Amino acid sequence: MKTLVLIIALLVTTTASAGTRDNDSTCDIRVGPAATLLLPYFEVDVSGQSGQTTLFTITNVNPIP
Amino acid sequence: MKTLVLGIALLIATTAFGGTRDNDSTCDIRVGPAATLLLPYFEVDLANPAGQTTLFTITNVTRFPQIAHVTLWTDYGYPAFNFNLYLTGYDVQGINLADVLRFGIIASATGTSSSTPPGSLSAAGSPNFSANPNCATTPGVFPASVAAALRGVFTTGSAPGLSCERVGGLHVHAIGYATIDVVASCTSRMPNDQAYYTADLLFDNVLIGDYQHLGAHPGGTDTSSFDAGGNPMVHIRAIPEGGSAGSNVPTGLPYTFYDRYTPAVNRVADRRQPLPSTFAARFIQGGPNAFATNFTIWREGFGAGDCASATASSYMPVAEIVRFDERENASVYGPCNVDPGNCFPAGAPFLPATSSKSAADSGTYPALNGTDAGGWMYLNLNNCGSFSYSVTRDTGGMPAPNSASSALSPAGATTKAGPRPSQNWVTITMFGSLGTNRLATEFDAAALGNGCSPAAFTSTAGGGSVPIGPAGGVFVCPPGPTLTNGTTALCTGTNVNPLP
């Protein structure tokens, strides 16, 4: 029983402190390396009259292609 | 026993899924209601009404009135001036720093005090205000003599009564940064006063803010044409949220935004999220359209906000900068490994607490070799650490601050002193001319980790052994699956920050 209580205590501790350590632990959206990028809107003047266009750039920030 | 087993199962389930439900569970900085807003840089041309200025706006997104305590800091990280804005429910208040510094006008004299009639949806008061919030006479206008002194501080770094020669840089324009905190009363205390954390600061994530830079030139330069740029402020949340001023609530944060200024017995008293140290910042530079980029960089200084600290915060080393052009050619400014006891990298730049510089500035950034008109920079802005910084860790079941090295400053990392890397923020301003049109855009650089990430090591580009990439490394592999090629040898990354 003592072991069991210890396990429970450890689990509670882990739950309480894990949040600020685990970067996968949030639904918050930050600006940082990601698996999907959303360009919410683009607009291009296909007639070329106004020159309106949208540019976007994608960067791989790690050494592996 | 069955009940106990069920209890354990529930706890495991809570542990596994709790993260994605608890908005207090992250060091990541998002744009959303916060307890502190950071305006990383402001600049005001004091002589020319059509010259540079910075506007910022604070919005209370709740029905309860809030008191926003604004502190203006010099570019050496010295708190020079503060004022309060009483925001009724859903109130929005804009500030033009040219009005503040040139004319001593904060806002309409009737618009920033608790005497302001609230809107129909606003509550009458806040249960978190102190017994006497003292906001009935919050000034809209302050004396001309004070405005004159501020102009001196933000352009020359000197002012009557200072116990040191200089607390800010020497520049024609007024330059600095601002913090805005939720507080319980219209206090005149500065954030470098420890009593601010026991009597004034609140913990409600209720404010949002944005800013606009206007002017003929981008901040910190006078060579390029520019119209305007804007961005959200840095939204820094209290974790956990809530409680009265001075409430001593444990936080899981290893250290906090105001670490240097908090009481020695409780260095995480502000509960504010810390900021990261490594960033990926895009630039455009040159080409037929005269593309140009400014990096505006806010940096955590040294010491506790006094005169001596200002001097130390005027010239802080940068651990490492690597510029990649569009063909992945890398050029490097000195990694932080020359003196293992300190950090004075060969050839690396030194930057103050806030600055805005062109990405083409050869005294600050590695040169762009070749003909490409763009790329990105890896910015490890760690100032190599300080023993005035702390981390708080559990010691015998009690949280205890410590300034010795920790798991956030692993041996060999670019933190050479103290327990953690320094905090930073980077915004990017791109501008140029496209025919008769002007390009002007401002946005945050991508943080490669967060404020709870350990200090980065010198990269392979700078002669070290750790590749540039997201903090924690790649690949991060969930338990069970292999990589697509059937191996797990490269599964060395982690998304979990170590305890300090």
Image (spheres, rainbow, N blue to C red):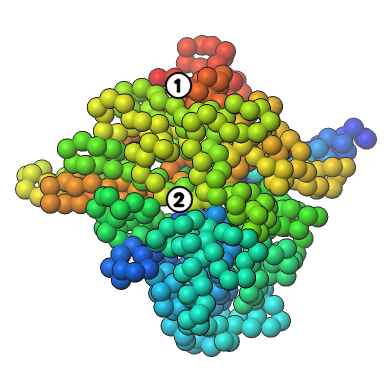
Tell me residue B62's x, y (percent). Answer: 53, 70
Viewer-proximal residue among B132 and B30: B132
Say the numbered circle drawn on residue B355. Answer: 2
Say the numbered circle drawn on residue A63. Answer: 1
In the image, residue B87 above or below residue B424: below
In the image, residue B49 above or below residue B309: below
In the image, taking residue A49 as reference, residue B191 lies left or right, namely right
In the image, taking residue B257 as reference, residue B58 lies left or right, namely left
- The residue type indicated by label 2 comes to Ser
> Which tag is nearer the camera, tag 1 or tag 2?
2
**Residue B127: in sight, yes or no?**
no
In the image, taking residue B361 as reference, residue A29 lies left or right, namely right
Label 2 environment density (alpha carbons within 10 Å; few <14, some 14–19, many ≥20) = many
Tell me residue B137's x, y (percent). Answer: 57, 87
Tell me residue A3's x, y (percent). Answer: 90, 32
Q: Which residue is drawn at 30% across and 64% down?
A: B51
Q: Quadrant of residue B92?
A: bottom left
Find numbered disc 1 in the image and state the secondary structure of the residue it sits on: loop
**Which image quadrant: the N terminus of chain B?**
top right
Of all residues, the one furthest to the right in this rendering is A2
**Which image quadrant: the C terminus of chain B?**
top right
Viewer-proximal residue among B327 and B114: B327
Say the numbered circle drawn on residue B478. Answer: none
- Determine the chain carrying the residue at label 2: B
Q: Which residue is drawn at 46% across and 57% down?
A: B170
- Determine the chain carrying the residue at label 1: A
